[in-house]
Image (tube, helix red, strand yellow):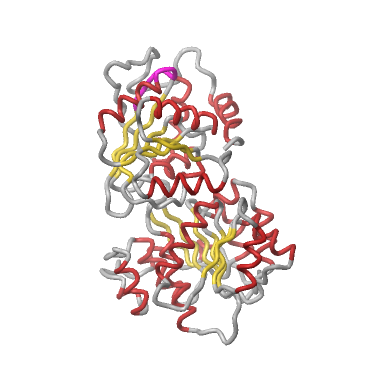
Amino acid sequence: MTDTASPSTSTSSADIEPAAATFAELGLRQELLDAVQASGYETPTPIQVQAIPPALEGRDVLGCAQTGTGKTAAFVLPMLQHFADNPASHSAVRGLILAPTRELAQQVERSVKRYGSRLSVEPLVIYGGASIGAQIDDLRFGCDVIVATPGRLLDHLERGTVDLSSVEVLVLDEADRMLDMGFIEDVKDIVKRTPKSRQTLLFSATVNSVLGLVHEMMRDPVLVQIGFEASAEGITEVIHPVDHAAKYGVLAHLLDEWGEEGQAIVFTRMKVTASQVCEFLQRKGVNADDLHGDKAQRDRERSLDGFRKREIRVLVATNVAARGLDIVGVTHVVNFDVPDDPKDYVHRVGRTARGDETGDAVTLMSTHEILLVKQIEKLMDKKVARRVVEGFEPSFPYAVEPEGPPPGAPDENAVRSRLGRGRRSR
């Protein structure tokens, strides 16, 4: 796309007007204000305050914010307002939202339906693992907004079952995650099928990782950057040093200590570990289920639905649930395994303390994970409190306040190489 500009030369968050007190002050239509109020939201978040006004003006927006800050509404509301203010003369796909995972795509589609409930906007979600024939039938029926994962949408484009030539607003949600998952070429191919005159809204947890996409796909973008590389307010974080073999016992002890109130998401690095932890908790009488890439789509949806309905107390998941899932009432996040990518820590713990809520983020750190924890603290520019769980004292030194790697520990590159193998099995 021509006429691109670096976001550093565009309007930054510092140039935006002071925070609005209400959604009405952002310039939204009454239908959208009613839908937002019906959803239970009263005050816009900082990313919404700063991203919605320029988006309503038709500007391209690069939004960077930590997870759990309301990014979905920041791009869905301006898109819906654009469609309402500019009715189409014929049926066509006017909006396209790309998301890295099925779960996030489903969640965004629900947001489009909820916020657009008082407008004549029909969304359709498309992702792999579902019947492509049924999706083709839905596409023939028609829709205004497509929410899709890149791989399956590209399948439809190659089959000629979807036409993006009328797209007016393109959204790349969790763009950095799509790059991490290897979707870069698919995304570029899809974007080429959309008009150059479109408005582009790109949201990411980081700026540097998506600069290539910004230069290639956006025109004079407004940069909105909120709470860069930090866990959200309202989250109490703690690290429990523990021997690796004792992690199961510590997890059971913590869940018992927290009681039956609230819900927890337990994150593991590998799919097999998620299954093992889930089976362990079930044997302990805990109402738990697991969520990872080896489960069939219908089983993943059943697990998420049960968790949302509070029928499941503990969800054990790989990083498939680390981004985008907005589930109210998650009181605890447990890093059973320390993530090998420091940014994943921020996204994991962001599953709790959504909106104005508070929550606890607990990390179980074994001796080989000390260096990974230090990388997380370096990224966030802060120390996370260490606390030994009584009865599960670790055998390794430097447990409470590590000043360096313990004797005999592998070097940092060796740790990342070994743990990186687990990332491919998510």
Q: Where residue 209 sits in the image (x, y, percent)?
A: 56, 50
Residue sitting at x 42%, y 59%: 71
141 vs 297: above or below: below
- In the picture, the quarter occupied by the C terminus is top right
> Is residue 153 in view?
yes
250 in relation to 353, above or below:
above
Relative to 284, is 137 on the left or the right? right
The answer to whether any part of residue 169 appears in the image is no
Please name whichever residue, 137 or 323, is drawn nearer the observer in this view of the structure.
137
Q: Residue at x 46, y 81 (%)?
A: 84
Q: Quadrant of the N terminus?
A: bottom right
Tell me if residue 236 is in the magenta stretch. no
Q: Which residue lies at the image location 74% right of the left edge and 62% below the top edge?
A: 158
Residue 244: within the magenta?
A: yes
Image coords of residue 349 (percent x, y): 38, 42
Q: Nearer the viewer, residue 58 or 129?
A: 129
Residue 153, located in which quarter of the rendered image? bottom right
Residue 125 percent across, percent down from the top left: 55, 62
Q: In the picture provided, is 107 more to the left or to the right than 310?
A: right
Viewer-closest of 350 and 93: 93
Image x and y of residue 333, in percent: 36, 38
In the rendered view, would you say 113 is above or below 388? below
Above/below status of 245 relative to 139:
above
**Which residues are the magenta region?**
240-246
